[in-house]
Amino acid sequence: MKIGEFSEKVGLSVFTLRYYEDEGLIRPQRDENNRRYYTDQDARWLMFVLHLKGTGMTMEEIQQYIKLRAIGDSTILERKELLKKVSQRAKNEIKELQANLRVINHKIDWYSGKLDSTISDSESFKEYLERMGEQSD
C-alpha cells in the first residue's frame, strides 16, 4: 500500500505516519524506486503501537520498547517489566479518574436533589458528600 492508502486503512493522517516514521515507531518498506509502501503486517504493528500509546506510554517508552524488540528475545524480561510499569501507571490513572468521576456524579446528584427539593437548601455539597460516605476537599 502506498502511504495514502495506508493512511486511510489505519485512520491516521499522512503527516502523522511520517512523524511516526521519523520517531522510529514504524518503518515502511521501500520499493526499487525508494518509495514507501506498507503491508498488512505494518498495519498490525501500528495498531499495537497505538495500543501502547493509548495506555499513556510515553514516546520515549515506546521507542525503548521498539529498540528492545529489535534486539530480540534476550530482551523479553526487560520488555515485560516496561509493560508492567506502564500497566500499573495506567491502572493508577484509571483509579484516579474513577474517583474524580464519582465526585462529579455526586455533584450532579446533589444538583438534582436541590432542583427537586429532595435535598434541603441548607445542605452544602460538603455535607452531602459526608452523608454519602465520601470525603471532600
Image: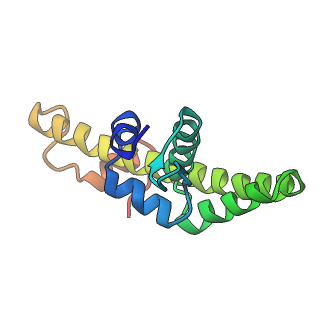
Q: Nearer the viewer, residue 83 or 113?
A: 83
The residue at the point 51 percent across, 52 percent down is: 53
The residue at the point 22 percent across, 49 percent down is: 123
Q: Quadrant of the C terminus?
A: bottom left
Q: Nearer the viewer, residue 34 or 28?
A: 34
The residue at the point 36 percent across, 48 percent down is: 103
In the figure, 50 relative to 126: above or below?
A: above
Q: Position of residue 5 (x, y in %)?
A: 36, 37
Q: Residue farthest to the front?
A: 32
Quadrant in the picture for residue 1? top left
In the figure, 127 relative to 24: above or below?
A: above
Q: Is residue 64 left or right of residue 48?
A: right
Q: Position of residue 19 (x, y in %)?
A: 41, 62
Quadrant in the picture for residue 92? bottom right
Q: Position of residue 93 (x, y in %)?
A: 52, 54
Quadrant in the picture for residue 81? bottom right
Q: Residue farthest to the right?
A: 74
Q: Position of residue 54 (x, y in %)?
A: 49, 48
The residue at the point 18 percent across, 31 percent down is: 118
Q: Is residue 30 left or right of residue 111?
A: right
Q: Is residue 136 left or right of residue 89?
A: left
In the figure, 19 relative to 117: above or below?
A: below
